[in-house]
Image (tube, rainbow, N blue to C red):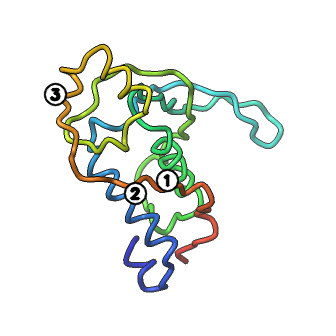
């Protein structure tokens, strides 16, 4: 995908997707949100239909900017079918819920990946656990991509 945006010299998309890849590489699987299967009522042509969905839960330690970032990534699937070719069943819609999951974060993450309240609480109550996280000493700047709209950056 990045190569497509590089060919088009779409600097905003290059910056966005480079940042996404960097975050994913740092978080790995253990730093991603928990999900549960559920059903939700949706409106299809005026009819109420129950549909299987994935409920995406919050992690108690992760900074909210990462949740917002991955919400944009999920929305991108709706706009960029050319990028996200998939065989088999289509992916389940992902719905973000306010359910908070308490799970230890992975080691070696930058401090900027953490919710400030989580760090402050750990410093007061469990400094040994905080030390065991072996947070990265490298600074990692958080970016705000609230204005990035994937529908404005088609890859057709």
Residue annotated with mark 2: 20
Q: Position of residue 92 (x, y in %)?
A: 51, 40
Of marks 1 and 2, which one's residue comes earlier in the chain?
A: 2
Asked if the residue under mark 2 is in contact with the one under mark 1, i.e. CB atoms within 8 Å, the reply is yes
Q: CA distance from mark 1 to mark 2?
A: 8 Å
Q: CA distance from mark 2 to mark 3?
A: 26 Å
Question: Element under label 2?
Answer: helix
Residue annotated with mark 1: 73
Q: Position of residue 12 (x, y in %)?
A: 52, 72
Which residue is depicted at the point 29% across and 45% down?
110
Which residue is depicted at the point 44% across and 69% down?
15
Viewer-proximal residue among 127 and 66: 127
Q: Position of residue 6 (x, y in %)?
A: 41, 81
Q: CA distance from mark 3 to mark 1?
A: 31 Å
Q: Residue at the right extreme? A: 46
Mark in front: 1 vs 2: 2
Q: Residue at the front extreme? A: 124
Q: Residues within 10 Å of mark 1 (few under 14, many from 20)?
A: some
Mark in front: 2 vs 3: 3
Asked if the residue under mark 1 is in contact with the one under mark 3, i.e. CB atoms within 8 Å, the reply is no
Residue annotated with mark 3: 132
On screen, 78 above or below 124?
below
Res. 63 image quadrant? top left
Q: Is residue 84 left or right of residue 108?
A: right
Which quadrant does the N terminus fall into? bottom left
Question: Element under label 3?
Answer: helix
Of marks 2 and 3, which one's residue comes earlier in the chain?
A: 2
Viewer-proximal residue among 16 and 80: 16
On screen, 69 above or below 100?
below
Q: Is residue 122 left or right of residue 48?
A: left
On screen, 4 above or below 130?
below
Viewer-proximal residue among 8 and 27: 27
């Amino acid at each position: 995908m990045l190569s497509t945006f590089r060919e088009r010299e779409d600097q905003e998309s290059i910056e966005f997707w480079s940042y996404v890849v960097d975050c994913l590489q740092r978080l790995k699987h253990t730093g991603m949100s928990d999900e549960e299967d559920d059903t939700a009522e949706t409106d299809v042509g005026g009819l109420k239909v129950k549909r299987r969905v994935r409920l995406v839960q919050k992690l108690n330690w992760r900074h909210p900017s990462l949740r917002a970032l991955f919400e944009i990534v999920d929305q991108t699937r709706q706009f960029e079918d050319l990028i996200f070719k998939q065989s088999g069943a289509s992916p389940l819609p992902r719905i973000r819920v306010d359910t908070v999951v308490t799970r230890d974060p992975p080691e070696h993450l930058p401090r900027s990946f953490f919710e400030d309240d989580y760090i402050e609480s750990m410093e007061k109550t469990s400094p040994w656990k905080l030390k065991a996280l072996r947070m990265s000493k490298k600074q990692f700047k958080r970016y705000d991509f609230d204005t990035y709209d994937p529908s404005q950056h088609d890859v057709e």
